């Protein structure tokens, strides 16, 4: 999941990447809410989330250290992982499996979209031929 939303491929999730992640997970946040989410787990104060800080979200959720209505709690619930139970290595494997599943789903969706576009183009050509006739 972390790699999926690291659009800059810099091993960090910045404010805009977090915004897109929360929107895709159907839990959009305000700009201030996103900043607050980062600030709550940003151990090195660089204004973005490293993988370790990302995993800290789930650790805090498992330890009951997050407010129930916070954006981080929403993210932890949507991601369905318990770092306390799985450990960091297990969490990493879960995230990588989710990325693989999402990538597979994206490829399937892309194939379907390509077929739909092809059908639309064929239909348009057919209409143009009929109109020219």
Image (cartoon, grey):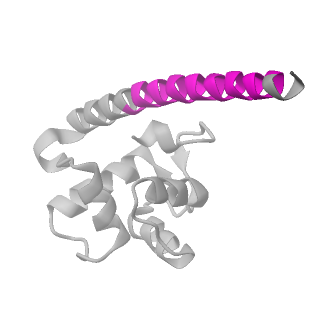
Front residue of this view, candidates 112 and 91: 112
Front residue of this view, candidates 9 and 114: 114
Instruction: Answer left or right for 96 relative to 48.
Output: left
- If the image is split into quadrants, where does the N terminus sit? top left
Instruction: Identify which residue is drawn at 21% across, 49% down.
Output: 80
Q: Where is residue 96 in the image (x, y as percent from the top left)?
A: 35, 30
**Magenta stretch holds residue 114:** yes
Instruction: Identify which residue is drawn at 28% across, 50% down.
Output: 79
Instruction: Identify which residue is drawn at 89% across, 24% down.
Output: 132
Instruction: Answer left or right for 16 relative to 71.
Output: right
- If the image is split into quadrants, where does the C terminus sit? top right
Instruction: Identify which residue is drawn at 31% across, 55% down.
Output: 56
Say whether residue 48 is visible.
no
Q: Position of residue 24 (x, y in %)?
A: 46, 53
Up the image or down, 88 lies above or below 115; here it is: below
Front residue of this view, candidates 120 and 21: 120
Q: Give the range drawn in magenta.
A: 102-129
Up the image or down, 77 lies above or below 37; here it is: above
């Amino acid at each position: 999941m972390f790699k999926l939303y690291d659009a800059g491929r810099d091993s960090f999730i910045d404010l805009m990447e977090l915004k897109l992640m929360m929107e895709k997970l159907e839990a959009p946040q305000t700009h201030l809410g996103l900043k607050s989410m980062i600030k709550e787990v940003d151990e090195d104060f660089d204004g973005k989330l490293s993988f370790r800080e990302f995993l800290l979200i789930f650790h805090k959720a498992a330890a009951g250290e997050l407010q129930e209505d916070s954006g981080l709690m929403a993210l932890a619930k949507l991601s369905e992982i318990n770092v306390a139970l799985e450990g960091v290595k297990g969490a990493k494997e879960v995230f990588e499996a989710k990325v693989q599943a999402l990538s597979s789903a994206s490829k399937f969706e892309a194939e379907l979209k390509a077929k739909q576009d092809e059908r639309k183009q064929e239909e348009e050509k057919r209409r143009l031929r009929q109109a020219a006739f």
